[in-house]
Amino acid sequence: MSHFTVLVVGSQFGWEEVDELLFPYWLYPNVLSQEQLRADPRFVFEKENPEESFEEWKLRNPKHINYYKDAQEYANQNLCCEKDLGWGYWINHQSKGYKWDWYRIGGRWSDFFILKQGAEGLVGSPPLCTESPTDLRAADQARKCDIDWEAMQERGRRNAEKIWDLAMKAAYPYREQWGYGLYPTDTKESFTAREGRLAGTTFAVLMDGNWVERVEGGWTPEGPSEKSMSEWHQKFMSLLEKIPNDAVLTLVDCHT
């Protein structure tokens, strides 16, 4: 289970257009009925052997091996049976970003944008058990021309300084802490500079009906390499430059 960010480029305020733009790339595993799936050209039926699928599930979930009584119960709850096709599941091969199944506007990245003085934007849904932001300059949806990108970079640098200080106090060497976003060659200066530069960069961009995301190449067991992050940032900035100033940008938190 993980989350990632998507910058959705649209033209209208509100969530309806965002839903429409994201619709083609949504995995939708448990949302549509079988009748709707059959009629939707995005979906194809993948046959599955219930016994083999159940055995694979048990290998992936050794702590919950007794959750299902047998393969039949597993199939009843996780697969569907189509006449003349047998057991299997419907899947949208267009789905992107690790096959996400639901999303929130803002979510874990609520108040992602910082607005210029006097500008207006919309705030989406904050994470569970978290109050909505009270900063009037915080937003999850705004026009590109109303976003204070320099202020976002400054916020990124300030947060990086706090992360660095926390990492230095960690029980084991901070250089082993991928969760902090640190690389072995980092200094406080290089780390804060990079985090400021990357502030506002998302995992993927949905623009003009095209989904572009950070590729997995160059990743290490601890996460993406510094080189791959730099290359994606350059790609992201080139996409950002092409977005019209009056375009409406929305920050989406996708769940896999």
Image (cartoon, helix red, strand yellow):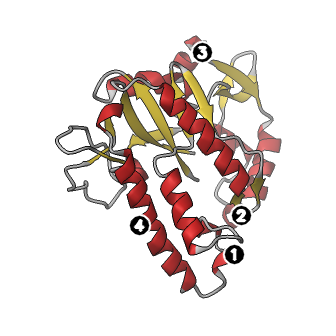
Residue 208, position in %: x, y? 51, 19
Report if residue 28 is visible in the image: no
Q: Residue at x 65, y 70 (%)?
A: 186
Q: Earlier in the sequence, mark 3 or mark 1?
A: 3
Where's the C terminus, which quadrant?
A: top right
Say which of 31 and 161 sits in front: 161
Instruction: Assign a secondary structure to mark 4.
Output: helix
In the image, what residue type sits under mark 3?
Arg
> Is 238 left, or right, of 173 in this rendering?
left
Residue 121, position in %: x, y? 25, 38
Q: Within 10 Å of the Cα at label 3, are there few (<14), some (14-19), or many (20+) other Cα atoms?
A: some
Farthest-out residue, left: 118
Q: CA distance from mark 3 to mark 1?
A: 48 Å
Say which of 69 and 174 sits in front: 174
Residue underneath mark 3: 38
Q: CA distance from mark 4 to mark 3?
A: 51 Å
Residue underneath mark 1: 176
Q: Earlier in the sequence, mark 3 or mark 2?
A: 3
Instruction: Assign a secondary structure to mark 3.
Output: helix
Residue 55, position in %: x, y? 80, 50
Q: CA distance from mark 3 to mark 2?
A: 40 Å
Q: Foreground mark, 3 or 2?
A: 2
- Contact between marks 1 and 2 (CB within 8 A): the answer is yes
Q: Foreground mark, 4 or 1?
A: 4
Q: CA distance from mark 2 to mark 4?
A: 24 Å
Report if residue 131 is visible in the image: yes
In the image, what residue type sits under mark 4?
Arg
Q: Which mark is residue 222?
A: 2
Q: CA distance from mark 4 to mark 1?
A: 22 Å
